[in-house]
Image (spheres, helix red, strand yellow):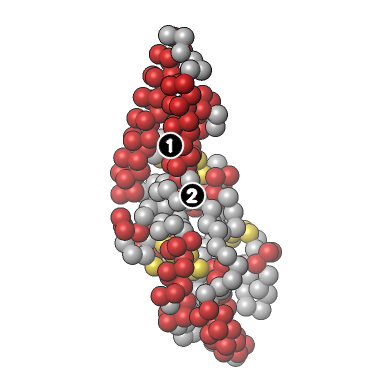
Amino acid sequence: MIRVRKPDQAPAVLAQRGPAAVALMLAEAANGAVDFEISREIYAHPSVKASLIRYQHRKCAFCESYFDHVSYGDVEHFRPKGGVTGDDGALEKPGYFWLAYTWSNLYASCQVCNQRYKRNAFPVTGVRATFRAPDLGAEHPLMIDPGVDDPGLHIEFIGSIPRGLSDRGRETIRLLGLDRETIGTRRRDVASDIRGHLDLALKYFDRAVAAGGEGDAEYEDTKRAMLLYAREKMDTKSQYALMARSIIRRHPVAAIIGL
């Protein structure tokens, strides 16, 4: 998981059709309704999905797998729209239906993260927001919101394995299955490639220093090349960028190239 940055302006279909649809649901809820007709034609409109995938750099907002490697992806509601799974596993209704068409509540997720793991889970500490008291600022989710939080403050990687640095990090890993074996296999391949490049570079730097070549043109060119390589792998656009940052920052080469 990595920070997702979307523009404040929502796709037109959400802004044009969402408010009226939400107003209708609020009126129904005021009369006791707990089930609502929530239109995929609005929240999962092709323009919405395309925008999410573009701003997420073709990656799942949660596991950072490229969509063309795992699936085309779902439009996921961070706060579940229909209901929330309670501690006993039962679905408690209503959900956060009034956020069904809210741009900040939508992400593109791979089907495994969304349908097999997260589903309707959304644990909070303290009071849960409701349509009658919708102040999200007073709510404290245990799941990391990639559009609000910095996942790097809550999750790190030991090799290719995620480890929680906080209660929220540990709960996010559990709820999203971020330590599942299927994704672990792909992450191990990427991690092995990164470590291979770093280890080869370290051997070169050690030999160069031993031979008195530290600071010469070839040495400096290699430093620049490795710095570019490291920045590319750590960039938000790269697959498994949070893992790459953990691996690279711990490697001795990081100090040599000025990271």
Front-lying residue, 83 or 61: 61
Residue at the spot 45% in from the left edge and 42% down from the top edge: 232
**Residue 219 % position (x, y):** 45, 21
Instruction: Check disc 2 and report the residue beneath it.
Output: 236
**Residue 53 % position (x, y):** 43, 63
Residue at the spot 42% in from the left edge and 9% down from the top edge: 211
Q: Secondary structure at mark 1?
A: helix
Q: Name the amino acid, label 1.
A: Tyr
Is 183 placed left or right of 24 in the picture? left
Q: What separation in Å lies between label 2 and label 1 (alpha carbons)?
A: 14 Å
Instruction: Check disc 1 and report the residue beneath it.
Output: 229
Q: Residues within 10 Å of mark 2 (few under 14, many from 20)?
A: some
Q: Place residue 31 in its image quadrant.
A: bottom right
Please say if 182 is above or below 90.
above
Sequence-first disc among 2 and 1: 1
Is 50 placed left or right of 215 in the picture? left
